Image (cartoon, grey):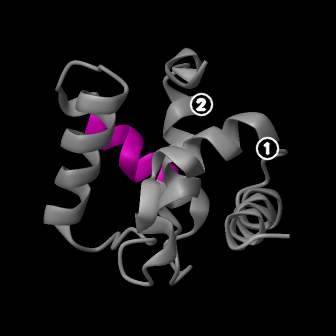
Amino acid sequence: MGKRDELIAKYADDLKNKCGIDPDMDLLTKVTIGCGPAIYDADASTVAATQESELETVKDNFLVKKLGLSDGPELMEAIHAVLGKYGMSERNKYRAVVYYMLTKHFGKESVYG
């Protein structure tokens, strides 16, 4: 099993055990691949939930540019909802897991079709 497969398994475990979600493994794999080399970097592979600038980056680069959503207050509300579901006390919020949950939240699975 390669490094990426190990990370996908770790992300699936987080979705099941920390978020109470039974993941669509095909979509999770595509979202993880979409994160590119960031998944291998300790800092870039996680979302700093307490840094407003990091949340703006998630909104601008992922929700607006990748998923094609229009900017509005509902985007930040969704990010906060997803991070809340992940658990604010959870130190490592993996970017691929957050992006997966946001993709599902907005029903944008077709972007990875």
Task: Tell me if residue 37 comes above or below residue 40 in the rendering.
Answer: above
State the CA–CA distance, disc 1 to disc 2: 10 Å
Badge 1: how crowded within 10 Å, few (<14), some, or many (20+)? some
Identify residue for label 2.
104
Task: Tell me if residue 34 comes above or below residue 44 in the rendering.
Answer: above
Q: Which residues are magenta?
A: 75-82
Residue 109 is one of the magenta-drawn residues: no
Quadrant placement of the N terminus: bottom right
Front residue of 73 and 37 = 37
**Residue at position x 33%, y 73% in the image:** 48
Q: In the visual, does 86 lie left or right of 66?
A: right
Q: Is residue 45 visible?
A: yes
Q: Is residue 24 visible?
A: no
Residue type at numbered disc 2: Lys
Q: Quadrant of residue 14?
A: bottom right
Asked which secondary structure carries label 1, the reply is: loop
**Residue at position x 32%, y 40% in the image:** 62
